[in-house]
Image: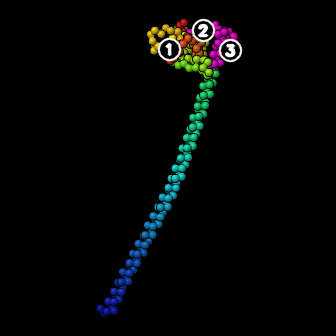
Amino acid sequence: MSDFTREKNRADNLQQQLNNLKTAHDTQRTVAQLEGDEAKFRRDEAIEQRQVNKALHENLVDSVRTNRGLGDIVFDLRLQLGDRQQRHLVVLDELKTARLQARRKGGGLGALPSEDIQPPPPLSGKVVSSRYGIGNRILYVEVSVGSDDGIKEGQLLTIFPGPGDGAAQKTKYLGQVRIIHVFPDKAVGTVREKAKNGVITKGDNVTSKL
C-alpha cells in the first residue's frame, strides 16, 4: 500500500471520529436542552401550584372567618329569642295567675265561679324546681305530679320540707301553691301563701292534704 493510500485512510478515520464526536455532542446538547425545558416546566408548574394553594388557603380562611361570624350572629339571636320567650312565658304565667285569683274571688278578668275548681285527689309528690318571675314578685314552683295524677288548674297543693331538712322539720308547713299549668307528669304553680322565713327548694314534699 502506498503512502498516499495510508494517509487517505488515516484522514478518513479522523474525519469519521470527528463526525462521531460532533454527533455525540449534538445529542448531548439536545438532551440537555430537553432536560432544561422539563426542569423549567416543573418549576413553572410548582410556582403555579403554590399560587393556587395560596388562593385556596386564603379562601378557606375567609370562609372560616365568615362562618365564625355567622355562628356568633346565630348564637346572639338565639339568646335574644330565648330571653323573649322566657319573658313571654313569665307574662303569660302572671296573666294566668291574675285570672285564677279573679276566679277564686268570683269576679274580674277571666273569672269563673270558685266552685268550678275541684279539690285535688289524695296525692303526694316533690318540688322539682322553684324560681321567681320578673321583678321577684311571683314565686313559681314546679312539682312532680300532673294531670295523670288528677291535678287540674286552679287546685291548691301544700308544701312541707323534704328529707334533707332534718327529721324535726318534716312536718313544718312551708306554704301553698295554686296550680296554673298542668302537664301529664308535672305541673307549675304560684305560691299563694308562704310560711314566714320558709324557703321552698327542690326536693321538698308536695301533698294535697291540708
Residue 131 visible, this angle? yes
Q: Nearer the viewer, residue 82 or 45?
A: 82
Q: State the residue position of label 1.
A: 204
Q: Amino acid at mark 2?
A: Gln
Spatial CA distance of label 1 from label 2 is: 24 Å
Q: Residue at x 51, y 53 (%)?
A: 53
Query: Which residues fall within the magenta stretch?
Result: 92-120
The numbered mark, 1 or 3, whose residue comes first in the sequence reads 3
Dot 2: few (<14), some (14–19), or many (≥20) neighbours within 10 Å? few
The quadrant in which the C terminus is found is: top right
Spatial CA distance of label 1 from label 3 is: 32 Å
> Which dot, 1 or 2, sits closer to the camera?
1
Q: Residue at x 47, y 64 (%)?
A: 40
Q: Residue 132: horizontal and vertical position, in percent?
A: 58, 20
Instruction: Give above or below for 32 relative to 50.
Output: below
Q: Residue at x 62, y 25 (%)?
A: 87
Q: Residue 125: horizontal and vertical position, in percent?
A: 50, 13
- In which quadrant of the rendered view does residue 94 lie? top right
Element marked by disc 2? loop
Instruction: Give above or below for 68 relative to 196.
Output: below
Q: Amino acid at mark 3?
A: Gly
The numbered mark, 2 or 3, whose residue comes first in the sequence reads 3
Q: Residue 47: horizontal and vertical position, in percent?
A: 50, 58
Instruction: Give above or below for 140 relative to 23.
Output: above
Q: Residue 193: which numbered mark, if any?
A: none
Dot 1: few (<14), some (14–19), or many (≥20) neighbours within 10 Å? many
Q: State the residue position of label 3.
A: 110
Residue 207 visible, this angle? no
Q: State the residue position of label 2.
A: 118
The numbered mark, 1 or 2, whose residue comes first in the sequence reads 2
Residue 98 belongs to the span the image colors magenta: yes
